[in-house]
Image: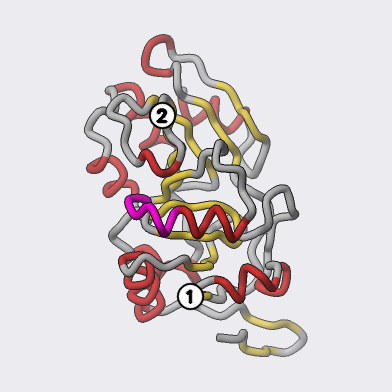
Amino acid sequence: MTGERRGDRTVPPALVADDARRLRECVAAGGVAIFPADTVYGLACDPLQREAARRLYELKGRPPERAAAVMFFSLAAALDALPQLGRRERAALEALLPGPLTVLLPNREHRFPLTGAAAVLGLRVPLLPEPLAALGAVDVPVMQSSANLSGGPEARRLEDIPPVLLAGADLVLDGGELPGIASTVLDLSEYEKGGSWRVVRAGPVGAGEVERALG
């Protein structure tokens, strides 16, 4: 899929319903997909299939002790899947998401263990711009990590993704040029008990914006 040329600029390609279907089917079949999000290009696989998780980590060269995040493509699906969330945590997620954030939450029921999440679970719900809105139809969670080699630069375009990842993936979706800044990582692991939070990795959402959202 390539962008359309209009005047002196290229309009990014828009994903369609068939792209969402192909992503869902790829993940369900145990494949690894490259897809565009609201920040950078990512790798996705089924967070409950051990072989798929192994392939994703192996493709990136990611150390097994480094946890990955779980991405839902709608906030409602994330809240439904995590009934263990406390009242304050749910309110925080409703105020902050969807958006370019990875939120760290207590993993009280040890969900999605293949992500490396024991005590803490990383959660992503992207705020999909109009060209990527079709991905909102993906109704399953995915294990998600950036589409780069471990420690390498983030990819804002398909051309920025290392060839070994493009060759090794079972599906590649082109969403054009993305913002290129990895998500803010926000630690809410102590938020339910005392309301404390901290930004672990700076990104598109600043501390001031988090503070305003949480009130």
Q: Which colouring convention does the figure follow?
A: secondary structure
Can residue 215 be found in the magenta stretch?
no
First in sequence: mark 2 vs mark 1: 2
Residue 34, above or below 204: below
Q: Give residue 121's position: percent from left, percent from top.
A: 42, 34
Labelled disc at residue 171: 1
What residue would you read off at disc 2? 118
Q: Give residue 6's position: percent from left, percent from top.
A: 67, 89
Secondary structure beneath label 1:
strand
Q: Which amino acid does label 1 sit on?
A: Leu
Q: Residue at x 64, y 53 (%)?
A: 61
Q: Which residue is drawn at 50% across and 78% down?
A: 14
Check the picture and name the quadrant holding the N terminus.
Answer: bottom right
| Range covered by the magenta-colored residues | 47-53
Secondary structure beneath label 2:
loop
Q: Give residue 21's position: percent from left, percent from top.
A: 33, 75
Q: How far apart are marks 2 and 1 (CA)?
A: 29 Å
